[in-house]
Amino acid sequence: MRFLRFLPINQQLRALIVSLGLFLAASYAHAEKPVDPQASPNEFVQTVADNALEALHDAPSAKKGDLATINALVDQYVLPYVNFEKTTRLAAGRHWRQASEQQQKDLAEAFKGTLIRTYSGALSKVDESSKITVLPFRGDPEAADVVVRSSISQSNSPAIDVDYRLEKTPEGWQIYDLNVEGIWLIQNYRNQFTQQINQNGIDGLINALNQKNQ
């Protein structure tokens, strides 16, 4: 499985896009339930997912994948629940420590743009019957790093198993990694980041990401 320009769209990527798309629509328009990052991990995930499905009904342009609408969703409503800097740092691995402070900032911004762009196809994949069911929590509810398991159903495809890795911060829970059908997001990007950095350095990776984001 290869992401970005290194990866053709396949079933795993489409599943990932669908699952992340549910979060991208969260709290858009007139979402009925306030998202409480201080709630239990399962409740946090379930509320975001429920709001996402409701938002799809209220935002036809987002459902069609309108980029401007998706950017608004991310900038105003989604980013508070996703730790993009941690996701980028873990994806970069040991190379993160070798990067300058400015390179770290630029890489995180470029990666954020890449993820936003990747999510742009998500809303068109979610239909009226889409539903996310959060499964019983198996971990320690008092832990600061947990995994929330879920299943996403659609009318024309099998259910998709998705795990969300969350960390507890002073502001509450934040999402920083996903596992779709046994494939962790960060691990896949780490492999591709390493390949690109080895060939062209940190700046080369940043440029490659930014070029795709244009």
Image (spheres, rainbow, N blue to C red):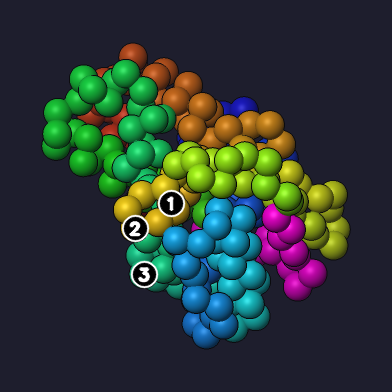
Seen from the viewer's position, the closer of residues 45 and 110 is 45
| Residue at 33% from the left image edge and 14% from the top image edge | 198
Is there a contact, CB below 8 Å, between mark 1 and mark 2?
A: yes
Residue 26 part of the magenta segment = no
Counting other residues with Cα less than 10 Å from the Cα at mark 1, is it few (<14), some (14-19), or many (20 or more)? many
Task: Specify the amino acid type for callout 3.
Answer: Gln
Q: Nearer the viewer, mark 2 or mark 3?
A: 2
Q: Is residue 29 left or right of residue 76?
A: right
- Whichever of labels 3 and 1 marks the residue nearer the N terminus, that label is 3
Q: CA distance from mark 2 to mark 3?
A: 16 Å
Q: Give the quadrant of residue 94.
A: top left
| Amino acid type, label 2 | Glu
* x then y, percent, for residue 161: 73, 44
Q: CA distance from mark 1 to mark 2?
A: 9 Å
Which residue lies at the image location 32% right of the left edge and 42% below the top edge? 85
Magenta-highlighted residues? 120-134
Q: Horizontal and vertical percent for residue 106?
A: 22, 41
Viewport quadrant of the N terminus:
top right
Image depth: mark 3 or mark 1 in front: 1
Residue 76 got which mark?
3
56 in relation to 86, above or below: below
Residue 201: horizontal and vertical position, in percent? 26, 20
**Residue 130 covered by magenta stretch:** yes
Give the amino acid type for the residue marked by disc 1 in the picture: Gln
| Residue of label 1 | 174
Q: For numbered disc 2, what is the local secondary structure?
A: loop
Asked if the residues shown at circle 3 and circle 1 are in contact, with their CB atoms under 8 angstroms apart, the answer is no
Q: Which residue is mark 2?
A: 171
Asked whether, in this view, residue 92 is left or right of residue 97, the answer is right
Q: Position of residue 206 (x, y in %)?
A: 28, 35
